[in-house]
Image: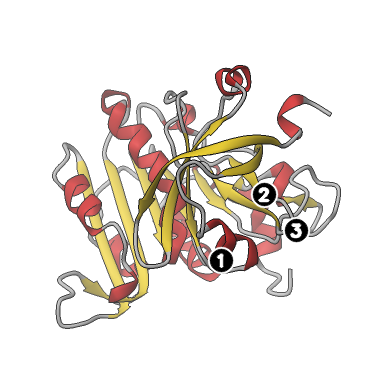
Amino acid sequence: MTLHELPAPAEIVERTEESASIFTLHLRFVDPARQAAFRSSPGQFNMLGMHGVGEVPISISSDPDETGLIGHTIRAVGRVTHALATLRPGDRVGLRGPYGRGWPLQEAEGGDVVLVTGGLGCAPVVSVIDYIMRRRARFGRLVIIQGVKHAEDLIWRQRYEAWACAPDTQVWLAADVGGPHWAWDVGPVTVLLDHAEFDHSKAHALMCGPEPMMKAVAERLLADGMPPERVWLSMERNMHCAVGHCGHCQLGPLFVCRDGPVFPYPVLAPWLRHRSL
């Protein structure tokens, strides 16, 4: 067992309220040597645990070059995340990680990047957006596409507005159900692909969100000429151990915690056809 697989105490240094049910915890290992040794890439996750409550996998939302604090954006939806929602600066959690394969950002350099997210799928790719914004000259056009079920589900409106003002950046938003103050499209995210401008032959598409949405978007991108190996999906499963031992997150021959959570489309395509998996 390696050092990063052993949980170690981490202190909550800052807490940011993102919405009524979503918050970001900025953590730092209590052991300075453990903090200095921590390295991650966008798309990887950590296991956060509370004694007597349990552990939960949470995507790392901070930039990999920010070595002082480790960010995790969390939605309170289950037993462990509701418990994490009660914590304040100065409290401690158990942290082990990072785990999994992240986004292929080095491969994507030099071309356009298309980010397609649905629901709260936006949380894991915020780190990707921030990563590209801080290294803007390395990438081509950045297309950010976000879909939500209801207009009021959209979080980070101010961030989307700021990203839309950045050079060579397009932001397209859609809600299945709009509202009186919804200024963007109404309908599925695939509609937004009609608006987006990018080079399908040289772009990378990174997706996170409901699997039917990702499958529909992937099929549309392939039909429009994007090579399948440039389409990447982040899968969500009930991950418990994070090292491929317990089998809870098995997807065919794959373990999402160990082999993913980010996969190239050709690897996932045979299993996306099976709705029961």
Disc tally is 3
Name the mark on residue 211: 1
Residue 84, position as x, y percentages in the image: 55, 56
Vertical comparison of 252 with 96: above or below: below
Q: Tell me: 65 left or right of 233.
A: left
Name the mark on residue 49: 2
Residue 48, position as x, y percentages in the image: 63, 47
203 and 120: which is toward the camera = 120
Mark-to-mark CA distance, 1 and 3: 13 Å
For numbered disc 3, what is the local secondary structure? strand
Vertical comparison of 110 with 220: above or below: above
Q: Amino acid at mark 2?
A: Gly
The residue at the point 79 percent across, 26 percent down is 2
Q: Amino acid at mark 3?
A: Leu
Q: Point out the frontmost of discs 1 and 2.
A: 2
Residue 106, position as x, y percentages in the image: 47, 26
Residue 261, position as x, y percentages in the image: 63, 48
